[in-house]
Image: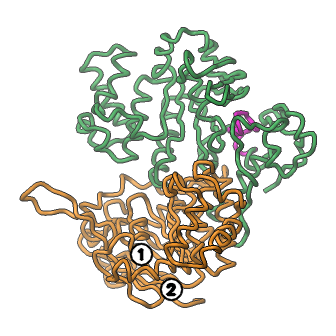
Chain colours: A orange, B green
Amino acid sequence: MKGDVVLRAVGVTKFFPVKTSFGKTPMVVKAVDGVTLKLIEGETYGLVGETGCGKSTLGRTLIKLIEPTDGSISINGVDVTRMTEKEMRPYRKTVQMVFQDPYTSLNPRKRVGDALVEVLTIHHLSKREDRIDVAMKILAKVGLRPEHFYRYPHEFSGGQRQRIGLARALILNPAIVICDEPVSALDVSIQSQIINLLQDLQEQDRLTYLFIAHDMSVVKYISDRIGVMYLGHIVEEAETEALFKNTLHPYTQTLLSAVPKTDPYSTRKRIILQGDVPSPLNPPSGCVFHTRCPYAMKACTSLIPVLKNMGENHRVACLRYDPDLSTLA
Amino acid sequence: MEKILEVCNLCTSFRTERGILKAVDGVSFDIGKGEILGVVGESGCGKSVTSQSILRLYDERKTAIYSGQVLLEGKNLFDLPLKKMQNIRGEKISMVFQDALSSLNPVLTIGDQLTEPLHIHQKLGKKAAVDKALDMLKLVGISAPLERLRQYPHELSGGMRQRVMIAIALACHPKLLIADEPTTALDVTIQAQIMDLIVSLNKQLDMGVILITHDLAVVAQTCLRVVVMYLGQIVEEAEVHELFDHPRHPYTLGLIRSIPEIDGNRKERLYMIPGMVPLLDQIPSGCRFAPRCTYATDRCRMEMPQLVSVSPSQRVRCWNVGKTGRKK
């Protein structure tokens, strides 16, 4: 491993209460259920999973846009879990976020430049007269021109807006950027421009990315390590090469095989998963994947698998890899 | 192969505040019985407008101006009175849209929406229509079909809704199904299910399918022939193997190279097509792709190239054909 751990999450859990009629037991949506992960300086950690698996909630919980129900989060070794908004503010500079939808995440009534300068004002950074210069510099850094400073968000295309979102995050010189599906709303030709930009910036500033996406091929391209989420749990985590060469969890296997290839000659047999993701309101007992798993055993319905290290930081949560239990089948 | 639909020199323009904008400019292609044709391109290239123009879905009394021909089994749809189009839509040609939630009626049950085309087109009675609806739901692989008939769209998952849309589209056994980004809003695992379903129904019912998508990988896995569009024009048409082995148009080449491959090399930098798609009121003169093209010459910037055949099944719109191809 190359650097220090910059962000560590232990057993992070987020339950959302759901309103029910009087007299009924209150229900909760288990969006994120006991996730433990760490981000290492300078790496890109890819977080993949289907819609509703909790990957965005996890991303937002990590920077405390959403208060976690349980667990702890520490940034650069400092526990920020129970900090108030005010105490948290210095750490907001360290961790910034880029959102999925470049159309709704920018204020339509603010000029791009003003939106960037505002960030500096809030954090009392640089002298007042220098702030415009700083904002101009950051625009250039993400590949926009100085005249864009005076324009409104609606004057930009999707790719340019995503660049603005990135500029707003980077103007604070963060160490960690959480990218929540930054390219899924973009066309392929623009997508590759943004991905290359993200990588250039990472090299220049030694940024750490948490890259949330549902597109396996993009995640593979950009990430050093990948975590696969399903129904609020991380079911497999490994370095990119290892995950693709030696895919262990049945869910990861199906997810990879479902990705269509840009090769018309490909004749590989695809595993097609039956049914949909179960509701997080009422997740299955035992292993959450057992309802759709092609290898489900009897034990899977009752025992909850824990992440087990299979060597070389390859962790998987599946009973099939549990030496004591795999014989039970 | 017997042709069921021929599109000849289709142009669709819209009256807007910025003047008349041509969204589709001289598009011609045909589709055979039981064939799956892929139409690919980025947002704003006119692929959806093409498909909706085939069914004349835009209001031609107010906003849209059509020209050219759309021949369904030899009959030009643009010659029909608007009222007669009702007999074509849903019966001969039907369509599946991208966003199933906003395309289904939220206040009608699945059963109501599924039996409606059967009442209108096939004049079935209530009982017969419900029986047929049940068959359709089984055909598209929906569990507990009897219960689903009484449910509303919001009670179903995304994949399930898309299946219902397909069931409605297929209820009257159309000759042609137009699927406009049917899997774009879905997860990969569900996308694989839906694409599998479309391919198997295409074989089973021997109907033609026009698959509109921006995802080249989906095309590679399902289609036989592909049309690539850019700014309202076809820039390349080829059989799928030809297209991926020898993309002749620089735009096609760029698209293919922009996609990170799932088993590709991570160290290699991703290919980028420079710039972005221009707006419809700023269409460049000459070749429309010239401002973003790395091979562009002065001729490209002045003169518009025509779509020419380079092999029996491949047509390309480029002045530099032969200088740009790549081998795998």
Q: Is residue B217 magenta?
A: no
A3 on left or right of B146: right
> What residue is rendered at 43% in x and 81% in y?
A37
Report the magenta residues as a range. Answer: B226-242
> What residue is rendered at 83% in x and 32% in y?
B309
Q: Position of residue A79 (x, y in %)?
A: 38, 88
Residue type, label 1: Leu
Depth order, front residue of B154/B203? B154
Q: Which residue is mark 1?
A: A62
Q: Chain of mark 1?
A: A
Which of marks 1 and 2 precedes in the sequence?
2
Q: Circle 2 — which element?
A: strand
> What residue is rendered at 39% in x and 70% in y?
A65
Q: Which mark is residue A6?
A: 2
Q: Position of residue B226 (x, y in %)?
A: 68, 39
Residue A241 is at least partly visible in this image: no
Depth order, front residue of B228/B281? B281
Depicted A90 relative to depicted A201: above or below: below
Depicted A38 relative to depicted A285: above or below: below
Whether labels 2 and 1 share one chain: yes
Depicted A266 relative to depicted A240: above or below: above
Main secondary structure found in the magenta portion: strand
Q: Circle 1 — which element?
A: helix
